[in-house]
Amino acid sequence: MSAESSTNAYWDAAAAGFDDEPDHGLRDPAVREAWAGRLRGWLPGRAVDVLDLGCGTGSLASLAAEWGHRVTGVDRSPRMVELARAKLAGTGAGVLVGDAAEPPVGDGRFDVVLVRHLLWMLPDQRAVLRRWVRLLRPGGRLVLIEGRWGESEPVGLTAAELSAMVGPLTERLSVEELGPDAALWGRAVRDERYALVADLAPVRRHREIVDVHLILRRGGDVLLARRANTGYADGLLHAPSGHVEDGEDVRAAMVREAAEEIGVGLGPDDVRVVLVLQHKAPTGDARTGWFFEAELGERGEGGLEPVNREPEKCSELGWFPLDALPDDMVAYCRAGLEAYRAGHRFALHWHESDDSIAYAPEGPDRLTPL
């Protein structure tokens, strides 16, 4: 069975409420106690922010929450999330529907990212690990429970394979064998099962997310997209945009994002840098945005009209007058477009902690040209 077909089978079973692992829900008190003992050793002794990705019905999340940790769970199955929310009711934990590979937590930062039996099913595992590490604060911890299952056609990740991927991203790591402990599984197992625990350095050099934004012009109008189901600035308008991936230059990132988000095929010579804007959200870290300009004719570049290629993240596309922008925009994007109209090439947009993520017509102007 291929990794892709295994993944689909897993999610089909999960959605139907079935499960071939008797420990998945930790329903057996002895199994729950065994996992509680292991989990206590992986989590800090003080209360911290824990992100449980692929949390399922919230079994491990409920243990962490019982000990006073501030838990956020993410799972792609609405049914799983419903069950997890019921299990975690009254603990203060939050559970979100979303893709664990790109968690919908905005600029949130966590002390621990906890993931059980999930990474092996995801494509581009190295990129996913980089995203997860970026969600950690300095000194944060990555806890990955994985394994290699099956005899004739095994699936999963060996500890050696996962260590090779995680090692360059963290300061130190250790592997704890779990297979020999039958109490964790409710039976004896022969597969390779383990927990990889990796810590970031307590202090890191200053780093910033780099993102790219497309100012797509059609005459005096500019294309904007309304965010939806992302967990950050949902309902607000923003230019087509995205993060620069590791090893990717900003121009290549802009060309890629234009194709992925709005289906417009731009070449490197079709986009021009018009603004570099350093921004800090009301809460969260600083980031640097590169704003690119591109022009469409009456029927679009090469006859191709912009289309919403990511309806799960965008509820609509629309053209708006650049000289009369709507108010219901992300403040960061609005500031970038205003700086562009004014001819500024470099600027700051530095929110204070009580500022709104949304553009506030009567609020303070945080745009500072450089």
Image (spheres, rainbow, N blue to C red):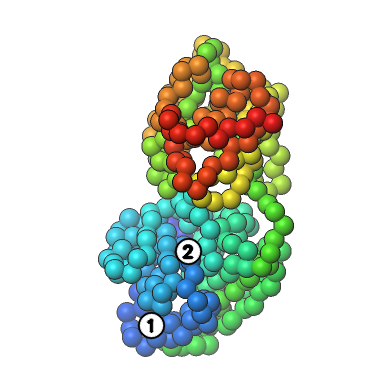
Q: Relative to 157, does residue 261 appear above or below in the rendering? A: above
Q: Residues within 10 Å of mark 2 (few under 14, many from 20)?
A: many
Name the residue beneath numbered marker 2.
51
Residue at 60 percent across and 56 percent down: it is 134
Q: Amino acid at mark 1?
A: Arg
From the viewer's side, name the closer residue of 258 and 359: 359
Decide if residue 130 is in sight here.
yes
Q: Secondary structure at mark 2?
A: strand
Could you say which disc has been placed on residue 297 in the image?
none
- Residue 303, quarter of picture: top right
Pinpoint residue 116: horizontal percent, then vertical percent.
48, 69
Q: Position of residue 176 (x, y in %)?
A: 59, 81
Q: Is residue 129 above or below residue 348?
A: below
User: Residue at image x 61%, y 20%?
Assistant: 342
Using the image, determine if residue 196 lies above or below residue 249.
below
Q: Position of residue 205 (x, y in %)?
A: 72, 57
Total numbered circles: 2
Q: Residue at x 44, y 82 (%)?
A: 35
Q: What's the amino acid at mark 2?
A: Leu
Mark 1 and mark 2: Cα distance apart in space = 20 Å
Asked which quadrant contains residue 27, the reply is bottom left
Task: Mark 1 vs mark 2: give the one in front.
Answer: 2
User: Residue at horizontal 33%, vertical 55%?
Assistant: 78
Residue holding disc 1: 32
Q: Position of residue 19 (x, y in %)?
A: 35, 70
Label 1 neighbourhood size at 10 Å, few (<14), some (14-19), many (20+)?
many
